Image: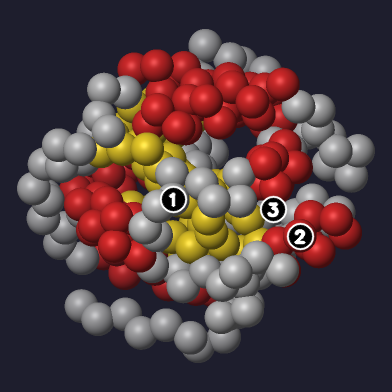
């Protein structure tokens, strides 16, 4: 339901193809989803707002946090803004996606359905990535040995999109704020997320099969088919 073209580089052939196909077609509004709230972070920088643009076409409301922060460091401001957004959520489930480089391509109801059916017992599911970032060996070692990590090359946590039970997400991101960023990427919150994974082996999972989230910023090749 969310395509994420992450990474600070310009060559994103799959993401560019999805972007073009989505915004060139006629997009009809989807039915309202009662059990889920979509949230994001956006402090008004000109590069942000893609997620909200796609959601608007679908008629999906997005709770936006972080507008009051002119200076932005992901390791500090992103978890804080996410918690601010979560404080406004009244639904049982919350789905997060980055504002700058995520596209919501369909009804969030399918995300809830997949969360319930494909990840039984989990409280929070992150999108999976082919890249281990920050490049910390202990993170890669732990994530490679997780159950299900051998089904595809999407085996590492990516914090750019996730879905979970709202009450658990609040507690999790409160713990994120208590951690320290890793020296390999001091500005990134992703090291904080990865460091907490071993604390929640039963509650947190990764979307190895890209059922809900497709992190394609570092993926090349003719591996998708777009049907119009």
Left or right: residue 193 versus residue 216 is: right
Image quadrant where residue 149 sits: bottom right
Residue 127 in percent (x, y) is at 51, 57
Task: Provide the secondary structure element on which disc 3 rests.
Answer: loop
Which quarter shows the C terminus?
bottom left
Residue 137 in percent (x, y) is at 88, 59
Label 3: few (<14), some (14–19) or many (≥20) C-alpha neighbours in 10 Å: few
Vertical placement of residue 16 versus 4, above or below: below
Tell me the number on the disc at residue 205. none
Q: Nearer the viewer, mark 2 or mark 3?
A: 2
Looking at the image, can residue 227 be seen?
yes
Which quarter shows the N terminus?
bottom left
Please name the residue that numbered disc 2 is placed on: 142
Please name the residue that numbered disc 1 is placed on: 122
**Depth order, front residue of 99/75:** 75
Image quadrant where residue 77 sits: top right
């Amino acid at each position: 339901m969310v395509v994420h073209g992450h990474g600070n580089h310009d060559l994103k052939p799959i993401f560019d193809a999805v972007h073009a196909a989505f915004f060139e077609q006629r997009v009809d509004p989807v039915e309202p989803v009662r059990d889920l709230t979509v949230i994001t972070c956006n402090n008004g920088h000109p590069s942000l707002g893609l997620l909200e643009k796609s959601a608007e076409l679908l008629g999906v409301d997005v709770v936006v946090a972080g507008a009051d922060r002119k200076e932005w460091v992901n390791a500090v401001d992103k978890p804080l803004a996410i918690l601010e957004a979560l404080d406004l959520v009244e639904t049982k489930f919350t789905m997060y996606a980055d504002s700058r480089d995520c596209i919501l391509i369909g009804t969030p109801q399918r995300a809830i359905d997949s969360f319930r059916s494909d990840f039984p017992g989990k409280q929070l599911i992150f999108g999976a990535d082919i890249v281990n970032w920050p490049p910390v060996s202990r993170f890669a070692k732990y994530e490679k040995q997780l159950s299900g990590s051998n089904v595809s090359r999407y085996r590492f946590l990516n914090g750019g999109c996730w879905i979970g039970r709202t009450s658990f997400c609040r507690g999790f991101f409160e713990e994120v704020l208590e951690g320290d960023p890793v020296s390999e990427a001091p500005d990134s919150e992703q090291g904080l997320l990865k460091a907490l994974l071993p604390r929640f082996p039963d509650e947190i999972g990764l979307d190895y099969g890209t059922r809900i989230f497709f992190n394609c910023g570092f993926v090349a090749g003719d591996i998708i088919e777009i049907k119009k």
